[in-house]
Amino acid sequence: MASSGQRVVLITGCSSGIGLQIAVLLAKDEKKRYHVIATMRDLKKKDKLVEAAGEAYGKTLTLQPLDVCSDESVQQCINSVKDRHIDILINNAGIGLLGPIESISMEEMKKVFETNFFGVVRMIKEVMPDMKKRRSGHIVVMSSVMGLQGVVFNDVYTASKFAMEGFCESLAVQLLKFNVNVSLMEPGPVHTEFETKMMEDVAKMDYPGADADTVRYFKDVYMPSSMDIFEAMGQTPEDIAKCTKKVIE
Ligand code: NDP
């Protein structure tokens, strides 16, 4: 239970990567300013988070199951924390999808939007009315540099992040008068399981139907230069967690 004066922060996708690090950093805040509700769709994956949280686990950090693609799961999660007002919502959960659209099914594409776009909308719809009523709150959304610029063979992923950017910019204007902030985070490359999976996808990717010049550009120019950027400028999930903490402070 959050003690008085503590801000309650609900974070999605805390089983790994950026979400896990934000949850741990906030839960270990020296001044104990935050009570973190760390959520993940499969609580069997909690060990890494629990270990990283150390003594904060069960005190300033509690766990809840949450699948952002399920209306029922989102409602259950929000109902289970109803006795506490959510001061800060951090929409971090997200998935990638790489490849030419000729080789990707509509189902896979919809899954990306269902998670990266509608997953965020679903959470905001549940949490926003209370924030408006209390005239206080902060909604943070983990977009990406790919929410600002399209990237070859990342068509659907970038589209989902672009959509999120438009949604948040429109929402931010409407929420200003209620003293509710909306912040978009736009990280470049971050070393997480997301990156590992992307590299695995590239290794086994085939390109049926894709234009040969585009494939050559992707393999010979885009991927090698991306690897250089990763090496030179890739950030850690801890870096992004620190930026996120600054944004909500
Ligand atoms: P990870 O793959 O490490 O983490 C993604 C998290 O999202 C996991 O906890 C995953 O849970 C969770 N998740 C996926 N689908 C759902 C769902 N339906 N409901 C709830 N949780 C779900 O990747 P990152 O930490 O790198 O990614 C976090 C965010 O940062 C994403 O939104 C991503 O787009 C964004 N980002 C990442 C960058 C990078 O280079 N890594 C760069 C820019 C932005 P599970 O373990 O169950 O799969």
Image: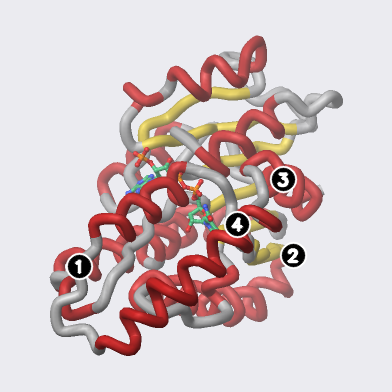
Vertical placement of residue 193 versus 206, above or below: above
The percent position of residue 36, horizontal first and vertical second, equals 61, 32
Vertical placement of residue 207 versus 8, above or below: below
Is ligand 1 closer than 8 angstroms to the Cβ of mark 1?
no
Give the alpha-carbon distance from disc 4 to disc 3, as whole Å. Answer: 14 Å
Mark 4 residue type: Phe
- Closest to the camera, between mark 4 and mark 2, is 4
> Quick one: 240 or 1, which is closer to the camera?
240
Q: Do the residues under discs 4 and 2 have CB atoms within 8 angstroms?
A: no
Mark 3 residue type: Asp
The percent position of residue 56, horizontal first and vertical second, equals 65, 16
**Circle 2 residue:** 179
Q: Is residue 213 left or right of residue 129?
A: left
Residue drawn at (15%, 84%), measured in percent from left and top? Answer: 209
The percent position of residue 107, horizontal first and vertical second, equals 15, 66
Q: Do the residues under discs 1 and 3 have CB atoms within 8 angstroms?
A: no
* Numbered mark located on residue 206 in the image: 1
Q: Which numbered disc flags the more N-terminal residue, 2 or 1?
A: 2
Q: Residues within 10 Å of mark 3 (few under 14, many from 20)?
A: some
Q: Do the residues under discs 2 and 1 have CB atoms within 8 angstroms?
A: no
Give the alpha-carbon distance from disc 2 to disc 1, as whole Å. Answer: 49 Å
* Numbered mark located on residue 230 in the image: 4
Q: Is residue 12 left or right of residue 67?
A: right
**Circle 3 residue:** 239
- Closest to the camera, between mark 1 and mark 3, is 1
Residue drawn at (69%, 57%), measured in percent from left and top? Answer: 233
